[in-house]
Amino acid sequence: MLLIRSTLSAFLVLLAGLVGLPSLCQGADVRVAVAANFASCLENLAPEFKAVSEHEIVPIVGSTGRHFAQISAGAPFDVFLSADRHHAQKLIDQGHAEGESSFVYAQGKLVFWMRDAQKADLQAILQNPQMKPVAMANPRLAPYGEAARQVLLNLNLSPNLDDRIVMGTSVGQTWQFAATGNCAGAFVSLSQVVTCPTGVVRLVNPNLYQPIEQQAVLLKGAIEVKAAREFLLFLQSKTAQKIIKKNGYGPGKLVP
């Protein structure tokens, strides 16, 4: 009788362990607050990450500025893919993000997309009163909008162009203004138009704006911490960086 009880107890302990086992093996949902410019690239990265980790990426797309405000207010995200260094660093300084987890995952490239081809240089094109309206992201919310603002200042076009500017809340909305025909041109990320079959894309001289170093960081409010750390490490892999480069970005940090 004692042997039966001992065997039963051992079986129950083993069964309890097996019941708990799937929670250790199942993939987690990693909630990623991602800058609008990187949304399509993240869609390409997600299945590759799942293949090596079983974890799912749950993207929350928006402007960097709005994500910053949401995270500061306690939004339940795991990872923040900012479109610049500034907002990620500010979250670290405020105690909302892990400083040691932060790194540059991509180098952004600003372009000017036009519906119709023109031979003139960018300054002449923007000065042409026939070229209207022009879209850009709100500089207060989106780093690509701030980069566009710097370009206009350095080309001595601001505020003369202000009455012809249409502002999006994010670079994603800015591209929609142009793609739907509501604007003749737009300052957007190269990643958004790299596969666009229509219009003309002009790379903006990088000397006209500060480098767009897109920063990734683990948030202190993260629930799926382990899975989030795996995703951040994956972003630094050769596989991920190859996809990021293919999507129109300069390289970020690479882990050997």
Image (cartoon, rainbow, N blue to C red):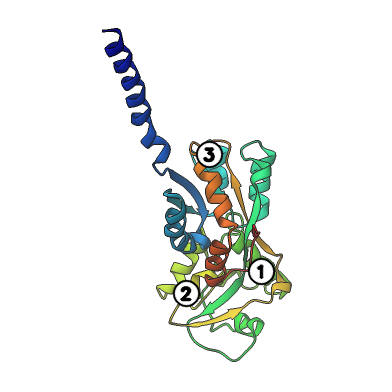
Marks 3/1: CA–CA distance: 46 Å
- Give the quarter of the image for residue 48: bottom left
Marks 3/2: CA–CA distance: 42 Å
* Of callouts 1 and 2, the N-terminal one: 1
Tell which of 9 and 34 is nearer to you. Answer: 9
Which secondary structure lies at badge 3?
Answer: helix
Tell which of 127 and 198 is nearer to you. Answer: 198
- Numbered circle sitting on residue 183: 2
Left or right of 146? Residue 38 is: left
* Of callouts 3 and 1, the N-terminal one: 1
What residue is at 42 percent from the left and 36 percent from the top? 24
Q: Say which residue label 3 marks.
A: 225
Residue 122 position, x and y percent, is 63, 82
Tell which of 87 and 185 is nearer to you. Answer: 87
Q: In the image, which is nearer the foreground, mark 3 or mark 1?
A: 3
Residue type for callout 3 = Val
Which secondary structure lies at badge 1?
Answer: loop
- Numbered circle sitting on residue 159: 1
Image quadrant containing the N terminus: top left
Mark 3 is surrounded, within 10 Å at the Cα level, by few (under 14), some (14 to 19) or many (20 or more) other residues, namely some
